[in-house]
Amino acid sequence: MSTLSIENISMRFDLPNGSHVQALKNVSLEIKTGELMSVLGPSGCGKTTLLNILAGFLAPTEGQITLNGHRVTGPDAERGMVFQQGALFEWMSVRDNVSFGPRMAGKREKDWAGTVDHLLDVVGLRDFKEKAVYELSGGMQQRVALARCLANDPDVILMDEPLGALDALTREKMQGLVLKLWKETGKTIILITHSVEEALLLGERLLVMAPRPGRVHKEYRLPFAEMGAGRDLREVKKVPDFAAKREEILTMIWDMEEEIMGRTEEAGA
C-alpha cells in the first residue's frame, strides 16, 4: 500500500515590495492508496497551491511530500494532472492525445494500443478516436484529458477544477464518470473544486480549507461518493444528510468569506 504523505507543508510567496503572502501553513495529511478526496474552501485558501506542490510544479518553503517512500521534488509520471482546461494538443487526434505519454516514454505501439483503446471505450470516445481535439465539445475534451492521464498509469491523479467550465448537465455526467473511473481503477484521486455539491459527491474524504494562512479547517468522511458510483447522482442529492452537510459547509465557507471581507475593509479604512 503506497501512501501520499504531506508533512508540515508551508508555502510563502515573497513580493517585490518586501511584503509576503503565506499561502499555506503547516499542512499535514496522510492519503492512502485508492482514496478519493475533494478539497474546497474560499478563494485564497491555498487549494491550487497545495495541488501544484503535490504535482511537483512548486517547491514548498517548508516541509515535504513523499509518495511510495521517496520525496517529491518535481513532476513525475507517478502523479498525473487534469486541468480545468484540458491542456490538450488540439491539432492531434483523440487517440494521439491519449497515447502521447506512452509514446514519449518510448513504448512500442503494441504495448500501449490495447490500453489506449480500452480507455477510449471507458470514457465513451472510441467512435471519435480519429477526430481532432478542436472538433470536440468541452465535455468530450475533458474525457480525453482523463483518458490521457490514465494512459500514463499514475499512482495519484490530481484534478484542478476539471469540471468547472462545463454546463450543468455535462458536469453531472462527468462527475459520474470520475466516480466510475475511481471505482474501476482504484487510483488515488485528489480533486479541487469551488462547488460544495461537487465536493460532497466526489469526496469520500472532504477537506475544507481556511485562508490566511491556508490550512485544513475541517475534514469529513462521507458516504456519498460510494453511493453515487453506478447510481443516478440526482438520487444521491435527495438523501437528507446530503442537504444537511451541504448547508453546513456552505455556511462555514460563507462565514470565512465574510471574515475575509471584514479584514479587507479594516485594512482599507
Image (cartoon, helix red, strand yellow):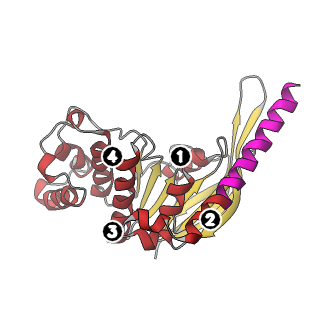
Residue depicted at 76% across the width and 22% down the height:
17
Q: CA distance from mark 1 to mark 2?
A: 28 Å
Residue depicted at 43% across the width and 42% down the height:
84
Q: Upstream in the sequence, badge 2 or badge 3?
A: 3
Q: Which residue is mark 3?
A: 185
Residue 197 to residue 32: above or below: above
Q: Quadrant of residue 137?
A: top left
Name the dominant secondary structure of the magenta segment: helix
Q: CA distance from mark 4 to mark 3?
A: 18 Å
Q: Which residue is mark 4?
A: 142
Q: Upstream in the sequence, badge 1 or badge 2?
A: 1
Q: CA distance from mark 4 to mark 1?
A: 19 Å
Span shown in magenta = 248-269
Which of label 4 and label 2 is nearer to you? Answer: 2
Q: Which residue is mark 2?
A: 245
Q: Residues within 10 Å of mark 4 (few under 14, many from 20)?
A: many
| Residue 115 point in image, percent of width and height | 19, 61
Which of label 1 and label 2 is nearer to you? Answer: 2
Q: How many marks?
A: 4
Instruction: Give the secondary structure at mark 2.
Output: helix
Q: Residues within 10 Å of mark 1 (few under 14, many from 20)?
A: some
Residue depicted at 48% across the width and 47% down the height:
160
Q: Which residue is mark 1?
A: 52
- The amino acid type found where label 3 is placed reads Thr
Q: Upstream in the sequence, badge 4 or badge 2?
A: 4
Instruction: Give the secondary structure at mark 3.
Output: helix
Give the side of residue 47 with respect to residue 163, left or right: right
Q: Indicate which disc residue 80 carries.
A: none
Q: Is residue 10 magenta?
A: no
Q: Is residue 256 magenta?
A: yes
Residue 174 to residue 131: above or below: below
